[in-house]
């Protein structure tokens, strides 16, 4: 059975929308950090594997364009839409079911949000969906090259975000417990495991040599968004769209209701197990996002069967259209930047506000720097990686920070006896404020109101640096 041309058309439309809006607003703090991190090539970083930083740096080096930088994310999001339809096709879904899967995935809030800018979650979504599709394919066919491909995908995906390995381990464990176990006895399965381990090994070794800083980062940021444990389950209802919850819930239930899908019961159990483990570990609610394309792919089959009458088809089309409009409004930079303060997008998706104000930030820091009469032996120190990266890329000045990757690239020279400090000054003395960050729009994002002060370190940099370093 061939993949419907309508699926390709839906993915192409999604890609066009993402590219058409990619240039609006400006860099996200993470994008600035990725570019700088990639300019320090390594097998890993304290907070992530190397793939995304190296890709961001390479694209920025070719041409500093937001559209070019964000193009891989847009392509990955559109490819995820096609993979959801491939899951549907793998379980016997015809054209209508494939269109349902692709349509629901393309208009999902998570698909548009992670397709808009550069984030490791984008590639986690793509690689986990591809892994689950290949695992479903291998299970239904009793083994075969799909299982080797699943291992390769999981390994490569881990070089963007290790979470795909976690999902993979849980899914395979569910298969071992629930069956069928026969596909896992295949030499292809063993080859897939070996391939995944071989690809991930360099990053794992880097983490081990540096004391597993990614675990520290994960612990420090756990539950810091989406309402923590209390908000974990409610957030799942809005991740795709409140109107499309019945489609992915149908995907959760279908392996228990369809005898011919019995072998796929590992998927809903893996979803449930990961959810419980994330809640227990105070993980962020969006960590489950990578399951939804596959669940929509399964749920599209019973949904397509439900669409027997014209009235039901109208209901689903209306749900998809409304979901598309709402998801785009929340996830994409559609509002004028000056209208963001107090808006629904800022309340639901505060990351959108982190794309605004960086040029004004850089200009303020540059003016403060230029106002210092004698800048010899003066460092620029920032409170977080986004500020340090913005100083380097937009103000074209060298900056230090104690956060994540920058913690490895400091401290300032011991001869620097003063510092232009952006942010908190609790470890600095004799501070004099030179400026305050103002984005010109009254938008209350993370940088608005940040002080810029000229200070003296309270101790020599080598002594102070361990206290300034933080992985979060």
Image: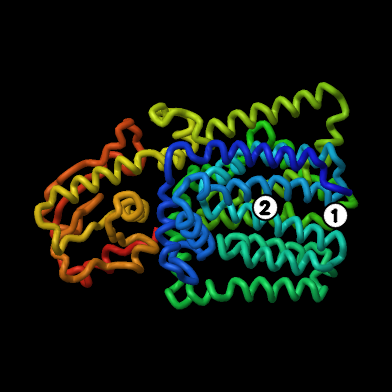
Q: Return the residue nearer the eye: 305 or 280.
A: 305
Which quadrant of the figure has residue 419?
bottom left
Q: Is residue 286 above or below residue 137?
A: above
Which quadrant of the figure has residue 109?
top right
Whole-percent x, y for residue 319 in the image: 70, 28
Coloration mode: rainbow
- What kind of element bears circle 1? helix
Toward the top, the furthest residue is 311
Residue at image location 70% in from the left, 45% down from the top: 81
Q: Return the residue nearer the eye: 344 or 401.
A: 401
Determine if residue 245 is in view: yes
Toward the front, the furthest residue is 62
Which callout, 1 or 2, points at the residue further toward the start of the chain?
Answer: 1
Whole-percent x, y for residue 22 in the image: 52, 40
Whole-percent x, y for residue 366 in the image: 23, 48
Residue at image location 61% in from the left, 62% down from the top: 157
* Residue bearing the label numbered 2: 272
Which disc, if any, is residue 262? 1
Whole-percent x, y for residue 102 in the image: 73, 41
Mark 2 neighbour density, 10 Å: few (under 14) some (14–19) many (20 or more): some
Determine if residue 234 is in view: no
Q: Is residue 464 left or right of residue 108?
A: left
Q: Is residue 152 above or below residue 294?
A: below
Distance from the alpha carbon under mark 1 to that under mark 2 = 17 Å
Which quadrant of the figure has residue 192?
bottom right
Residue at image location 76% in from the left, 45% down from the top: 251
């Amino acid at each position: 059975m061939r993949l419907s041309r309508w699926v390709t058309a839906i993915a192409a439309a999604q890609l066009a929308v993402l590219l058409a809006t990619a240039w609006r607003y400006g860099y996200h703090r993470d994008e600035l950090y990725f570019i700088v991190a990639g300019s320090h090539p390594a097998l890993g970083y304290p907070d992530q594997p190397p793939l995304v930083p190296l890709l961001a740096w390479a694209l920025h080096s070719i041409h500093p364009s937001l559209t070019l930088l964000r193009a891989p994310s847009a392509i990955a999001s559109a490819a995820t839409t096609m993979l959801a339809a491939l899951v549907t096709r793998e379980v016997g879904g015809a054209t209508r079911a494939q269109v349902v899967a692709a349509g629901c995935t393309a208009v999902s809030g998570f698909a548009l949000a992670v397709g808009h800018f550069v984030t490791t979650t984008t590639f986690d979504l793509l690689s986990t969906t591809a892994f689950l599709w290949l695992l479903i394919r291998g299970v239904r066919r009793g083994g075969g090259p799909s299982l080797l491909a699943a291992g390769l995908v999981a390994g490569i995906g881990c070089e963007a975000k290790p979470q795909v390995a976690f999902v993979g381990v849980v899914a395979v464990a569910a298969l071992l417990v629930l069956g069928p176990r026969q596909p896992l006895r295949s030499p292809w399965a063993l080859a897939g495991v070996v391939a995944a381990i071989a690809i991930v090994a360099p990053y794992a070794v880097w983490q081990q040599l540096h004391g597993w800083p990614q675990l520290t980062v994960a612990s420090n940021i756990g539950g810091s968004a989406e309402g923590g444990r209390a908000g974990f389950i409610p957030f799942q209802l809005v991740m795709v769209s409140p109107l499309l919850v019945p489609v992915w819930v149908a995907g959760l239930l279908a392996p228990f209701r369809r005898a011919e899908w019995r072998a796929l019961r590992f998927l809903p159990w893996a979803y449930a197990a990961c959810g419980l483990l994330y809640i227990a570990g105070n993980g962020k609610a969006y960590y489950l996002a990578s399951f939804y394309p596959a669940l929509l792919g399964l749920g599209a089959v019973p949904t397509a069967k439900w669409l027997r009458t014209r009235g039901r088809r109208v209901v689903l089309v209306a749900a998809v259209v409304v979901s598309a409009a709402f998801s785009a409004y929340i996830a994409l930079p559609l509002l004028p930047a000056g209208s963001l303060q107090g808006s629904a997008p800022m309340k639901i998706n505060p990351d959108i506000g982190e794309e605004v104000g960086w040029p004004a930030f850089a200009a303020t820091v540059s003016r403060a720097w230029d106002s210092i009469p004698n800048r010899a032996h003066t460092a620029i120190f920032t409170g977080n990686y986004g500020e340090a990266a913005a100083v380097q890329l937009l103000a074209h000045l060298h900056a230090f920070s104690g956060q994540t990757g920058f913690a490895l690239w400091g401290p300032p020279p011991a001869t620097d006896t003063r510092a232009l400090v952006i942010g908190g000054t609790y470890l600095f003395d004799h501070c004099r404020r030179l400026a305050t960050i103002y984005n010109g729009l009254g938008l209350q994002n993370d940088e608005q109101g940040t002080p810029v002060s000229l200070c003296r370190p309270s101790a020599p940099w080598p002594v102070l640096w361990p206290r300034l370093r933080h992985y979060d």
